[in-house]
Image: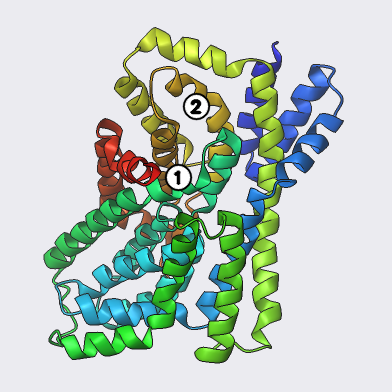
Amino acid sequence: MSIPAILGIALVVTMLLGVPIAIAIGVSTMAALMAGGIPTTFLAQGAFTSVDNFPLMAVPFFILAGTLMETGGLSQRIVNVASRLMGNVTGGLAIVTVMACMFFAAISGSGPATVAAIGGIIIPSMIKRGYGRDYAGAVASSGGSLGILIPPSIPMIVYGIVGNVSISSMFIAGIIPGILVGLALMLVSYIIARKRGYTGSGEKFSLAELGKAVWEAKWALFAPILILGGIYGGIFTPTESAVVAVVYGMIVGLFIYKELTWKDLPKCFINAALTVGAVMIILGTSTAFGRLITMYQVPQAVASLIGGISQNKYVVLMLVNFLFLITGTFMETLSQVIIFTPLLLPVVTSLGVDPIHFGILLVMGAEIGFLTPPLGVNLFVATGIAKVSLEEVSKAVIPFIIALFAVIVLITFVPQIALFLPQVLAK
């Protein structure tokens, strides 16, 4: 039996047995190494070199920044602005949820963190207002998926490192697709709310009240401007911007809003460290896995297989989109990025696909993975807040998944949606 076959079979078997994805990847890599007579230190070396990377330092800092800003009251003020802006529309709280997720996504870089920060505030309010628990959980889950598409984005950072693609360009490319997905989710929220009879807040729109909410939230709203403006303005790198975000979140939370206390800091650091630890374990084993499949020329074999199906880049990209749709149900986001980047990036670029375009499609495919059981992390976070079963939320989130996939198809055939801003700013 060939080494790639052993690698693939071991991975499938361990995952079917319910082994955590990071361990499953590590075990399958180890099995292939032993079968091929390759020193097992290959796994340790791959894991070490994967985390010994300066741009990767942005990941723990963005995770910590999101935790500090959630605890420090920034997410609550973002919700207040969105409520004043759209709260009285039919299904207003659902639209507010998506809008607030879009704002917070520009701070956190994480899908589950966005669900926790925004959903923890709005889901209970939606339920009190008479919204269905399943609907409330579905809206927060889908809105939270924007956490990895609207920059900064942790999966984009990892894709940039693995694929040797500009992280700043990836961030810029995610802006328009992120807005489109947000609008699509708002439209679905409105249609379902209208069908179910979910009304708005009953409070008439007031420019004065909106202005007051914006003024109170000015420090929260300035955070994405500082982070992204600094990157695009060439003031600091994405890694440095993550550190700036941490310092900014601490200063605002401790000294301006004063909702973050010194006693809260250890808890914030511990929560961030636990998340970072899980990310680094996945990253380490996945990197060794990726190097092994590259060593045995699996990407070339995949390219040959796909080439036998079609040489049309749009047909290939649609096949890849469906692949992401399936693998997202059982593979963690970063694992998808790390494994599929070396596997598929050479294939699609040989057909004339821009690496940034492919990266956006990969991240958007990973977004759907957040919303599909059994590994839909956003669903688990939302069900805990809404106190509803996973089955109910999984059914309620289907229209949102359809809307998200429709945007993916649009961007597949109109790559300029993703490439326009990077090309303009590169001139």
- Whether residue 344 sits left or right of residue 37 in the image: it is left
x, y (%) of residue 282?
66, 45
In this view, the mark in front (1 or 2): 1
Q: Nearer the viewer, residue 373 or 52?
A: 52
Q: In what quadrant of the picture does the N terminus appear?
A: top right
Query: What residue is pinned by disc 2?
Result: 345
Query: What residue is pinned by disc 1?
Result: 170
Q: Secondary structure at mark 2?
A: helix
The answer to whether one can see residue 127 in this image is yes
x, y (%) of residue 132?
28, 70
x, y (%) of residue 250?
60, 80
Q: Secondary structure at mark 1?
A: helix
Instruction: Look at 30% across and 86% down and name the residue there.
Output: 213
Residue 7 sits in which quadrant?
top right
Q: Residues within 10 Å of mark 2 (few under 14, many from 20)?
A: some
Total numbered labels: 2
Q: Residues within 10 Å of mark 1 (few under 14, many from 20)?
A: many
